[in-house]
Image: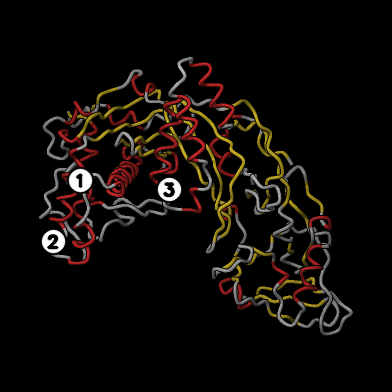
């Protein structure tokens, strides 16, 4: 089944349709539609996604600084090979030669078409009325509605729960439902699954285990049983290493990186720092640049994906990406801000021994401090932008550039959504720039929160690719003119 054909849906497409670089890996990107789960079967590559030298350097340097200490994620980008490529580019003057060299050694394509098929290696179909389990080849799909019907009673079929790994072992992060049945031989269960047949009943040896009952969906594992078609004996589902859960596309999460064109930020931009001069809620002396850029050029690339639920596996993917021109906010900090933050953190935590000790040795040059500040700043923008613009949180993304000490928050839709531009506008009723209220509310929110460093009420957000780690609202205190003695804390 073909599920993607145009550039219009490229934002969702590159995040859902993913293929492993290693063709022996069977776990592909998952896609959910009308309660059924599909796996990516094939992707047609379109035109090459072109990078210039500066974009590639920003991508490599930031990736290395942010993920270099994580061996699982670091393997997704060939940093050393790309550094060699950047070294070669330093000795080349011809822009066309540079472009061709980058295209050859860092091949990434746009996606033009994706084909999916039912995830038959993970799920079966199940009828809530007759309780029968079916393999894909046993049912028919109603093409006009794209639903699967029970051959016995015509009811729309559901998909079975699956097993997800709950303790770290060398086992697969997911397994199908009928392979962990108490009292049945494990090898026989797996052989039956691979052959798409129901396993024989271990009690009567005449019937097959082809009916599924969940007496209490709120207690899925405890109440789930498989029933023999002949003797009607019930067999409990059990695994020491796995737990039952509903299958969803969230079992495959893309690992996406971004870069941007610095030259594009100069086109028709608005200087937001000039609107905040002498503001009581924002200190412009720490800011090198603060712009609204209506024509920011962003490139997003999926390098891999995390597969699983509680325990995940990092899988390197075939590189696909997209480039967009969109509205963005760009804020670059001066280097002395990090010196100020280093001292500020020690002052804030002087009455908390463990936190004070944690930041005692932190200096302005520590990359972890730069990451903490920039990541926190990006999240701070995200928490307030939906309220100002009326655009939902998941319509924004961000890049924090540790090379230039900058944050770029952008709208994910090609052409933009008219959200970031709100900060450059004037509130006619209040007779002041909208950005003043933006930072006033942000300052109040961060200053009055009582969490230890971040929570959902200040700067933690859903969907953070770094799982809301390396965040601290206290790092924004100096920028928002919050005195160390006045900022609240809950420890």
Do tag 2 and tag 1 residues touch (Cβ < 8 Å)? no
Residue reaching furthest right? 206
Relative vertical location of residue 450 with respect to residue 409 in this rendering, above or below: below
Give the mark toward the camera: 2 or 1: 2
Q: At 68% across and 49% down in the image, what residue appears?
A: 39
Query: Which color scheme did the rendering employ for the protein?
Result: secondary structure
Pointer 2 residue = 350
Pointer 3 residue = 67
Pointer 1 residue = 443
Relative vertical location of residue 163 with respect to residue 117 in this rendering, above or below: below
Do tag 3 and tag 2 residues touch (Cβ < 8 Å)? no
Mark 1 neighbour density, 10 Å: few (under 14) some (14–19) many (20 or more): many
Mark 2 neighbour density, 10 Å: few (under 14) some (14–19) many (20 or more): some
Is tag 2's residue or tag 1's residue first in the polypeptide sequence?
A: 2
Q: Quadrant of residue 259?
A: top left
Q: Quadrant of residue 326?
A: top left
Q: At 36% across and 54% down in the image, what residue appears?
A: 469
| Residue 300 percent coordinates (x, y) | 49, 35
Question: Helix, strand or loop at disc 2?
Answer: loop
Is tag 1's residue or tag 3's residue first in the polypeptide sequence?
A: 3
């Amino acid at each position: 089944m073909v599920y993607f054909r145009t550039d219009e849906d490229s934002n969702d497409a590159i995040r859902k349709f993913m293929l492993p670089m290693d063709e022996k890996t069977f776990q592909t990107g998952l896609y959910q539609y009308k309660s059924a789960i599909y796996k990516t079967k094939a992707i047609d590559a379109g035109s090459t996604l072109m990078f210039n030298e500066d974009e590639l350097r920003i991508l490599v340097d930031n990736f290395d600084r942010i993920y270099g200490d994580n061996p699982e994620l670091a393997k997704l980008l060939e940093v050393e090979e790309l550094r060699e490529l950047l070294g070669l580019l330093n000795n080349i003057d011809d822009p066309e030669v540079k472009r061709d060299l980058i295209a050859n050694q860092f091949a990434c394509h746009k996606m033009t078409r994706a084909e999916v098929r039912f995830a038959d290696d993970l799920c079966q179909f199940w009828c809530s009325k007759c309780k029968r389990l079916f393999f894909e080849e046993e049912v028919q799909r109603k093409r006009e509605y794209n639903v699967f019907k029970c051959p016995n009673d015509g009811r729309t079929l559901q998909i079975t729960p699956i097993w997800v790994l709950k303790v770290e072992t060398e086992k697969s992060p997911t397994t199908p439902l009928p392979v962990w049945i108490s009292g049945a031989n494990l090898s026989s269960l797996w052989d039956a699954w691979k052959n798409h047949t129901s396993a024989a009943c271990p009690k009567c040896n005449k019937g097959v285990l082809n009916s599924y009952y969940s007496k209490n969906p709120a207690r899925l594992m405890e109440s789930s049983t498989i029933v023999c078609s002949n003797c009607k004996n019930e067999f409990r589902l059990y695994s020491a290493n796995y737990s039952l859960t509903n299958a969803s596309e969230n079992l495959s999460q893309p690992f996406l990186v971004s870069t941007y064109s610095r030259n594009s930020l100069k086109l028709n931009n608005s200087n937001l720092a000039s609107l905040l001069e002498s503001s009581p809620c924002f200190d412009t002396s720490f800011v090198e640049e603060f712009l609204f850029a209506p024509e920011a050029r962003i490139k997003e690339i999926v390098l891999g994906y995390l597969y699983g639920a509680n325990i995940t596996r990092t899988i390197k993917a075939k590189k696909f990406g997209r480039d967009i021109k969109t509205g963005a906010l760009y804020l670059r900090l001066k280097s002395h801000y990090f010196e100020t933050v280093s001292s500020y953190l020690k002052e804030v935590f002087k009455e908390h021994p463990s936190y004070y000790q944690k930041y005692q040795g932190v200096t302005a040059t520590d990359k972890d401090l730069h990451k903490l500040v920039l990541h926190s700043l990006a999240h701070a923008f995200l928490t307030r932008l939906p309220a100002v613009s009326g655009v939902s949180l998941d319509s924004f993304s961000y890049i924090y550039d540790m090379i230039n000490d900058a944050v770029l928050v952008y709208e994910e839709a090609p052409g933009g959504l008219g959200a970031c531009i709100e900060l450059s506008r004037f509130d006619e009723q209040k007779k002041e720039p909208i950005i003043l209220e933006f930072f006033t509310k942000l300052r109040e929110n961060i200053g009055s929160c009582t969490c230890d460093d971040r929570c959902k009420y200040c700067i933690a957000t859903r969907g953070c690719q770094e799982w809301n780690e390396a965040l601290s609202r206290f790092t924004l205190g100096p920028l928002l003119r919050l005195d160390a003695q006045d900022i609240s804390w809950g420890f």
